[in-house]
Image (spheres, rainbow, N blue to C red):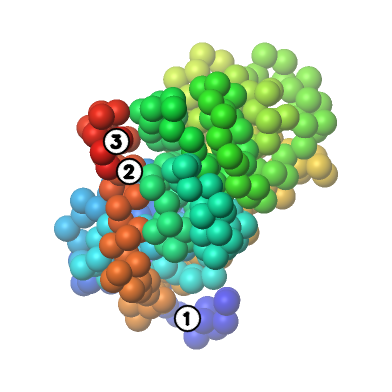
């Protein structure tokens, strides 16, 4: 995938991205887990929910999505008239891989009295098979709007689902998927790190297993963790999520110290998301130049997937009451 760089000798990649961004009327959206050099030139850096909203609202003609494939597909579902490009189409997600649509469909059919509340980290096909999509920043708010009598399948992240169950005291049928990045944190090494930094709080993403979340002073989405880093009282934070988010923390509060939580070898670098890391400045330049790789979604599938995403966007803004919800499902 790095082969194109060989023909880029002499090209000022940053200047070309600037030129093409204007020429194409493109917006560059980047997730917090992207490489710092991509975050630095993006028009907007955000979490999954914020990026979905930006994709829906933009009046740009081209959305250059620097994130993973399900995020770029979400942008296309919400903004079908835009050209959506992703620097590397191989940027997948272990949660998406854990939930093949045919198996998810069979699971749904085996539980006809359950609705499917589904994490946005899944394929467009699984979104089309779901009732409501959630992100980590909206899941709690959305779940608390669903009547207690309603049975729920939650997929594909069993750790986020387990966290919501514990926090809201609500049983759900959990799909057994995991994020390989958050799964790799080591409790033993985290305890050692905490001992080396007495008093430093731990912030964890709810994709972490319970044995990591149990050590956290704050649990939340990437934007929630970033906000905690800015507002917490101390000057050192242990960060149990993908370490590229530390770039935004260092920009926002440069006087504070941020330490990535370790994996089993004691080194936090094993928690870099291999899918997010596929996107590079060179590939972003080529994508803007050639308008490919481009996201295409069959219209019937897109409309079906959009229903569950629209419910997320409405419920995350608090505009749907419980009565409305009963009528909509
Ligand atoms: P959020 O940015 O919504 O917290 O999601 C994290 C993530 O895993 C993206 O893949
Ligand atoms: Fe998927 Fe985990 Fe990477 Fe996010 S960090 S894209 S959940 S593998």
Label drawn at residue 329: 2
Cα distance, mark 1 to mark 2? 51 Å
Depth check, mark 1 against mark 2: the one in front is 2
Q: Identify the residue shown where x is 25% and y is 66%.
A: 80
Quarter of the rendering occupied by the C terminus = top left
Q: Secondary structure at mark 3?
A: helix
Q: Identify the residue shown where x is 72% and y is 39%.
A: 185
* The one of 30 and 174 positioned closer to us in this rendering: 174
Q: Position of residue 236 (x, y in %)?
A: 60, 23
Give neighbour class at mark 3: few <14, some 14-19, many 20+ (Cα, 10 Å).
some
Which residue is identified by label 3? 325
Confirm if mark 1 falls within 8 A of ligand 2. Answer: no
Which residue is identified by label 1? 8
Visible residue check, residue 167: no
In contact (CB < 8 Å): disc 3 and disc 2: yes
Tell me which numbered mark, 3 or 1, is placed earlier along the sequence.
Answer: 1
201 horizontally vs 118: left or right: right
Q: Residue furthest left?
A: 59
Label drawn at residue 241: none
154 horizontally vs 292: left or right: right
- Image: 94 above or below 133: below
Give neighbour class at mark 1: few <14, some 14-19, many 20+ (Cα, 10 Å).
few
* The one of 78 and 238 positioned closer to us in this rendering: 78
Q: Position of residue 305 (x, y in %)?
A: 35, 58
Cα distance, mark 3 to mark 1? 52 Å
């Amino acid at each position: 995938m790095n082969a194109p760089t060989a023909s880029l000798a002499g090209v000022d990649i940053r200047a070309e991205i600037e030129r093409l961004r204007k020429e194409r009327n493109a917006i560059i959206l980047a997730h917090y887990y992207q490489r710092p050099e991509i975050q630095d030139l993006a028009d907007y850096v955000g979490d999954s929910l914020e990026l979905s909203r930006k994709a829906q609202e933009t009046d740009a003609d081209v959305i250059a999505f620097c994130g993973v494939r399900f995020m770029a597909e979400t942008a296309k579902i919400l903004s079908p008239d835009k050209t959506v490009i992703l620097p590397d189409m191989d940027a997948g997600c272990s949660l998406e891989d854990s939930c093949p649509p045919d198996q998810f469909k069979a699971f749904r059919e085996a539980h006809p009295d359950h609705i499917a509340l589904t994490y946005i980290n899944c394929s467009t096909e699984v979104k089309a098979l779901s009732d409501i999509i959630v992100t980590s920043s909206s899941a709690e708010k959305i779940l608390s709007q669903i009547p207690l009598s309603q049975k729920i399948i939650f997929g594909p992240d069993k750790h986020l689902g387990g966290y919501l169950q514990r926090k809201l005291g609500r049983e759900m049928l959990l799909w057994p998927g995991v994020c390989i990045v958050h799964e790799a944190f080591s409790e033993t090494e985290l305890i050692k790190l905490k001992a080396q930094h007495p008093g430093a709080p731990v912030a964890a993403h709810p994709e972490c297993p319970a044995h990591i979340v149990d050590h956290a002073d704050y649990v939340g989405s990437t934007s929630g963790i970033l906000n905690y880093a800015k507002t917490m009282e101390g000057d050192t934070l242990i960060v149990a999520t993908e370490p590229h988010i530390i770039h935004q923390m260092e920009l926002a509060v440069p006087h504070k110290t941020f330490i990535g939580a370790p994996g089993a070898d004691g080194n936090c670098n094993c928690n870099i998301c291999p899918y997010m890391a596929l996107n590079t400045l060179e590939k972003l330049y080529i994508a803007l130049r050639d308008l490919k790789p481009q996201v295409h979604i069959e219209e019937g599938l897109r409309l079906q997937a959009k229903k569950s995403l629209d419910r997320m966007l409405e419920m995350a803004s608090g505009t749907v009451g419980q009565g409305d919800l009963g009528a909509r499902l």
